[in-house]
Amino acid sequence: MEERARSCLLRSKATLEQDIKASYLMDHMVSDGILTNDEESRVLGKPTRREQAAALLEVLLRKDNRAYISFYNALIRESYGDLANLLHRDLPLLSPEGERSFADGVSPSVQVILSEGGVPQRPVVFVSRPALLNLIREKLYRLQNTPGWVTVFGMAGSGKSVIAAEAIRDHALIKECFPGGVHWLSVGQCERADLLVRMQSLCFRLEQGQSSEASQRPPCSVEEAKERLRFLMLRRFPRSLLILDDVWDSSTLRSFDIQCRVLLTTRNRGLADSVSGEYFEVPVESGLDEEKGLEILALYVNGKPQKLPEQARSIVSECKGSPLVVSLIGALLREFPDRWSYYLRQLQKKQFKRIRKSSSYDYEALDQAMDASLQVLEPEHRDLYRDLSIMQNDVKVPAKVLSVLWDLELEEVEDVLQELVNKSLLFRDCNQRPYHYYLHDLQLDFLIEQNRDQIACSWLCLSPRVQRFTDRP
Ligand SMILES: Nc1ncnc2c1ncn2[C@@H]1O[C@H](COP(=O)(O)OP(=O)(O)O)[C@@H](O)[C@H]1O
Ligand SMILES: [Mg+2]
């Protein structure tokens, strides 16, 4: 265990011993895979509550960072918020390796629940955000005995979807609060017709394997879908969690106002005002702090944060710490390790034709990053990528669809996709077979913006490939 974490435990030892009930906390720590049953029994063998607490701390001090975090989480779950605060400042930063093995501690059964529920996997380059994560988990625990909403809000690219998925990748949380499972739905900015399609697919997913009514026809209106979902969530999947990712407007949200447990991500704060039931809010800061930003860059270039070139800090600050933008730049640097100054200059240039969006997101930084990513593509691939502007928000497509769009052999398409994924220009959902591909909504915004003039001009300006595709019935 890190020195800092150790000394914090030692410092707080007396207070902790006085207050905690070890048996409760150990339940969580055993299911996190931190304590063995033997260790638990030994602690419980002590005659008094206080001696048990002292014994638990003894065991803890001999363990690693993950133990500290697990203990901290257990305090939160058992409503020892004030004690958790004592430990909060010294929460260790887990190395990605450590974090990964911790996540692998998610039991196979929970793993199945997560992938059946369509929960996205963790991005390959990932840094932990323990304080934020714990905050979300703490709020989710409030839904243990009551339906309600946990809203994670923040600007685009701030890491909401990633952190929401991470929050439910937790064995104890799923077992204790959502034994009925989790159901992830990417909503995005959508018209009513799109919304209906999404609700239908959710109904379909929930009705699968339900023998008698398996052949039910899909609901034909949003209202009907809402009632169907209400029934399914109440009767078939009580105590399950619905995750609505990236909801834009309150009328969409009201279609899910069905007295269930919801984790919501949105850029739009206060959206949950429009629905009934308890709700809890968790803000996501738009940028990571410098250390985390550097950690991402370091992971991309396989180096240590301390050993990064001097430009690294300025790059993180030009990116405003946005996880999305830092990741885009990181992916570029992985490929061109001697371009630190070059990308920094690009970020600093700020010569943009585009009007700054009124949204709180710093579109300039993204444009710079996106533009830089596009410039390194071969011209042909750049054109193919631009064609993706006809993809819809949050719609994921298999390579086959793109082979129609691009009019290329499947194998060629797969090669191009691999390149785009490597450059963080495109995302791959490995939960689905065949793999599905999608753009981050910011990237889509960017492409649409870039293409808009041409599209407005005339059909003739569209590339022939897109024309062929859109002409199809
Ligand atoms: N904790 C993280 N560690 C590393 N990269 C991250 C992290 N969170 C987000 N990112 C990067 O930022 C991108 C955008 O994150 P996402 O969660 O989709 O943002 P949002 O949902 O807020 O728009 C991700 O695709 C990933 O590349
Ligand atoms: Mg998102």
Image: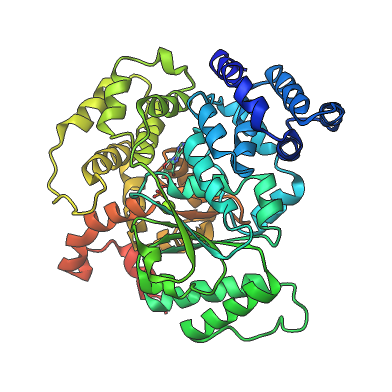
Q: Position of residue 392 (x, y in %)?
A: 39, 64
Name the quadrant containing residue 77. top right
Residue 56 or residue 226, whichever sits in front: 56
Name the quadrant containing residue 339. top left
**Tally of numbered discs:** 0
How are the colours assigned in the image? rainbow
Q: Is residue 454 left or right of residue 446?
A: left
The residue that appears at 36% across and 34% down in the rendered structure is: 326
Q: Is residue 222 left or right of residue 56?
A: left
Residue 169 or residue 434, whichever sits in front: 169
Name the quadrant containing residue 65. top right
Q: Position of residue 459 (x, y in %)?
A: 22, 70
Q: Is residue 412 visible?
A: no
Q: Quadrant of ligand 1?
A: top left
Q: Position of residue 335 (x, y in %)?
A: 41, 28
The residue that appears at 21% across and 68% down in the rendered structure is: 460
For the N terminus, the image quarter is top right
Above or below 368: residue 289: above
Q: Position of residue 42 (x, y in %)?
A: 86, 26
The residue that appears at 73% across and 22% down in the rendered structure is: 54
Q: Is residue 367 visible?
A: yes
For the C terminus, the image quarter is bottom left
Above or below 426: residue 346: above
